[in-house]
Amino acid sequence: MDMPEYQRVQLQFANYIRDPASNSLPAGVEQRRMDIYKRLFFNNLSSFCKKSFKSFRPFVEDDEWNSLIRGFMREHSCHSPYFKDIPIAFVEYLESSNLKKSEFPFMREMCHLDAMRMQLRLVPDAQSCENLDIKDRTTLISLSSTVRLLSYEWPVQKITPSTWDSKKPTQPTWLVAYRDPNDVVDVLVANVHTFRMLEVLKIAKPLEALTTQLCEEFSVPLGTLAKKLVPTIQAFNKKGVILTTRKA
């Protein structure tokens, strides 16, 4: 079935906006008008991505950045109409494209962390009962919905243009990105044991069950682990990383 005329014109218009170097001007539209649309779309997307990827943007010159944005427009199909979903779509583009990554091998991970920061600013507030005794068997402990557990090959939370080392670390970086009760987004560096504890708490459970499971996984005495867990959980609870609720 042939495409309706209006859809054909829309497709020509969109193709030209995405990649003016490889597509013809839509029939009946003067160059001056298309140049305005072309600049408007590109500049809006570039500006939004610049604000979204504040960590990575300083690493590249303007020409390189413009090339990245043009490639994103040309090659990636976004499936969401919302601006808030653009950062994740850009990371997907970085993952699937044939970009040369040798110069900045941490690029995808750094942009992913920035996308998670943006996502956490918009995620709905988590519900929690405050001031519950975590040692009480009726208290359930769980990971907040305003938390993202992230594992990267590079320490992207601290890399800057003046400090980064091209030598890849031998150990991964474990990060806890979260939004605190004051709506401030922050990132903590965790060790593998703390990271695993938070992974386990994706499913709510009482302290006793958590301690028992981690003792088995870490092969450490129950008493030793319990002494460390309580202050750790309490500290995370104050930051809004861990929630406490009453068992039904």
Image: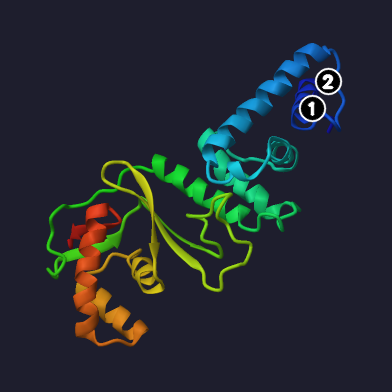
Mark 1: secondary structure: helix
Residue 53, relative to residue 205: is it above or below?
above
Residue 243, visible in the rendered structure? no
Q: Quadrant of the C terminus?
A: bottom left
Q: Residue at x 83, y 20 (%)?
A: 26
Q: Residue at x 28, y 64 (%)?
A: 204
Mark whose residue sits in front, 2 or 1: 1
The residue labelled by disc 1 is 16
Mark 2 or mark 1: whose residue is earlier in sequence: 1
Q: Which residue is mark 2?
A: 26
Q: Which amino acid lies under the numbered mark 2 shown in the image of this protein? A: Pro
Label 1 near label 2: C-beta < 8 Å?
Answer: yes
Q: Tell whether 221 sits left or right of 103.
A: left
Q: Position of residue 179 (x, y in %)?
A: 34, 47
Separation of residues labelled 2 and 1 (CA atoms): 8 Å
Residue 5 showing in the rendered view: yes
Tell me residue 93's x, y (percent): 67, 48
